[in-house]
Image (tube, rainbow, N blue to C red):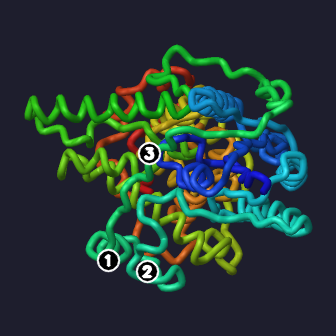
């Protein structure tokens, strides 16, 4: 009887711990074939001429895949790396290695699900099954107190019912060992140049350097909770609100799972509530995309009232040349590092939508290019909330009550612009 081989198609789940598809493949198959595919679709240039994926995020991704390969090698396994359309690459590898089934984690946003459907159709022609798993949320879909079609559109109602009636599952065990077929050509990691990008320049003012990979993710999680532990022991009133976990880059491509973070939070009681709330928002946006699809971020039917000079103002917003210190500082930081705080994201998005009245979808696309921690559901869901184009009943965040001047003083990036004239830096519209 021939060996059973399962191909594990890694996408936004670049980890070994708490990875159900990897564990199930090890349990169900004699051999496991781990694969990661750099899809050229994500590295093309958009109609505006900008790269769909910016250099900071691409570098972070390459580092994460390299770390996954290294960690798999520690289990005696190997990661096959290819550059190409997954609908071509996955079937080719399935045929070459006599694969019996392919596992992957299900996605929810349009582009990602379309790619899955293309791979599934190609495998179906070979009489092979693409098995879908759910592994990107804190709460499992099957544990929600309502079917997807009945999920409340109001986050407040969603939160109340989920926290009252659902439980977060335990993390799945890590495989003890991983047996792979004999691999003739594992493939090399691509360079940024091969992906059509240039090497990003790290700005010395950046507060953090984000290193891709599960190893760095676990270090960052330990660092955050160590800080939280110290704050609690010192009884200085800090409950996590004054320092960010900055785990979002690793969560976005699955170097660490929401469940792993949740179960660490549970050790700290109410002191971890803020981070738990952020994880729940991530869940909510994913479930909204699952429920509504593209309609969740579809513009209203009525004509949108853009400012006459919206294109020029949009470019000034991108460049950090609006003349509003806080806006410009945040955009300079985004451009120079690929990361800004959640609060500043809401502020600059609100400014683009409500003050300069530019096309919010162009703002969302710019964030998609620039953000290291870009996640389709969270990014586009957030922007749609601020633009008011979905069925949400409340704003996502109460934007800072502090005056812009107080916030500006906390960043070095505010000094990188030269305004022609500013009458009142406090003239910032609340998002």
What residue is shown with label 3?
342
Task: Tell me, yes or no, if residue 409 can be seen here.
Answer: yes
Q: Give x and y (percent) for residue 313.
A: 67, 46
Residue lying at 46% horizontally and 78% vertically, measured from the top left: 153
**Quarter occupied by the C terminus:** bottom left
The residue where tag 1 is placed is 161
CA distance separating discs 1 and 3: 25 Å
Q: Residues within 10 Å of mark 2 (few under 14, many from 20)?
A: many
The tag earlier along the polypeptide, 1 or 3, is 1
Q: In the structure shown, which secondary structural element does the residue marked by tag 2 occupy?
A: loop
Label 1: which secondary element: helix
Q: Residue 386 or 283: which is nearer the viewer? A: 283
Give me the residue at 44% from left, 21% from top.
412
Q: Earlier in the sequence, mark 3 or mark 2?
A: 2
- Mark 3 Cα shell of 10 Å, populated few (<14), some (14-19), many (≥20): few
Q: Quadrant of residue 55?
A: top right
């Amino acid at each position: 009887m021939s060996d059973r081989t399962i191909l594990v198609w890694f996408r936004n789940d670049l980890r070994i711990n708490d990875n159900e598809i990897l564990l199930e493949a090890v349990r169900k198959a004699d051999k496991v074939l781990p694969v990661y595919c750099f899809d050229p679709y994500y590295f093309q240039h958009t109609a505006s001429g900008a790269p769909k994926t910016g250099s900071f995020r691409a570098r972070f991704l390459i580092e994460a895949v390299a770390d996954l390969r290294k960690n798999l090698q520690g289990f005696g396994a190997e990661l096959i790396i290819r550059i190409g359309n997954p609908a071509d690459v996955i079937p080719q590898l399935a045929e070459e290695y006599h694969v019996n089934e392919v596992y992957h984690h299900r996605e929810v946003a349009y582009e990602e699900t379309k790619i899955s459907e293309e791979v599934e159709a190609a495998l179906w022609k070979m009489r092979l099954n693409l098995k879908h798993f759910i592994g990107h949320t804190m709460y499992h879909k099957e544990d929600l107190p309502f079917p997807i079609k009945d999920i409340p559109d109001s986050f407040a109602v969603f939160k109340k019912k989920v926290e009252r009636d659902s439980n977060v599952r335990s993390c799945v065990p890590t495989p003890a060992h991983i047996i792979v077929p004999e691999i003739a050509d594992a493939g090399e990691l691509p360079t940024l140049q091969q992906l059509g990008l240039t090497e990003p320049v790290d700005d010395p003012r950046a507060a953090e350097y984000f290193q891709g990979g599960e190893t760095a993710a676990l270090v960052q999680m330990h660092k955050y909770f160590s800080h939280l532990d110290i704050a609690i022991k010192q009884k200085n009133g800090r409950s996590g609100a004054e320092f960010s976990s900055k785990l979002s880059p690793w969560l976005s491509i699955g170097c660490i799972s929401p469940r792993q973070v949740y179960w660490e939070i549970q050790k700290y009681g109410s002191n971890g509530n803020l981070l738990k709330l952020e994880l729940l928002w991530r869940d909510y946006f994913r479930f909204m995309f699952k429920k509504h699809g593209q309609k969740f971020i579809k513009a209203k039917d009525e004509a949108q009232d853009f400012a006459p000079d919206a294109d020029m103002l949009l470019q000034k917003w991108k460049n950090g040349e609006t003349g509003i210190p806080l806006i410009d500082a945040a955009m300079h930081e985004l451009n120079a590092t690929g990361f800004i705080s959640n609060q500043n994201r809401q502020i600059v998005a609100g400014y683009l939508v409500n003050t300069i009245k530019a096309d919010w979808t162009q703002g969302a696309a710019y964030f998609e290019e620039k953000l290291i921690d870009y996640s389709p559901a969270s990014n586009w869901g957030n922007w749609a909330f601020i633009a008011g184009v979905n069925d949400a009943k409340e704003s996502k965040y109460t934007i800072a009550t502090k005056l812009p001047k107080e916030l500006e003083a906390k960043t070095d990036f505010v000094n990188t612009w030269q305004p022609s004239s500013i009458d009142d830096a406090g003239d910032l519209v609340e998002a």
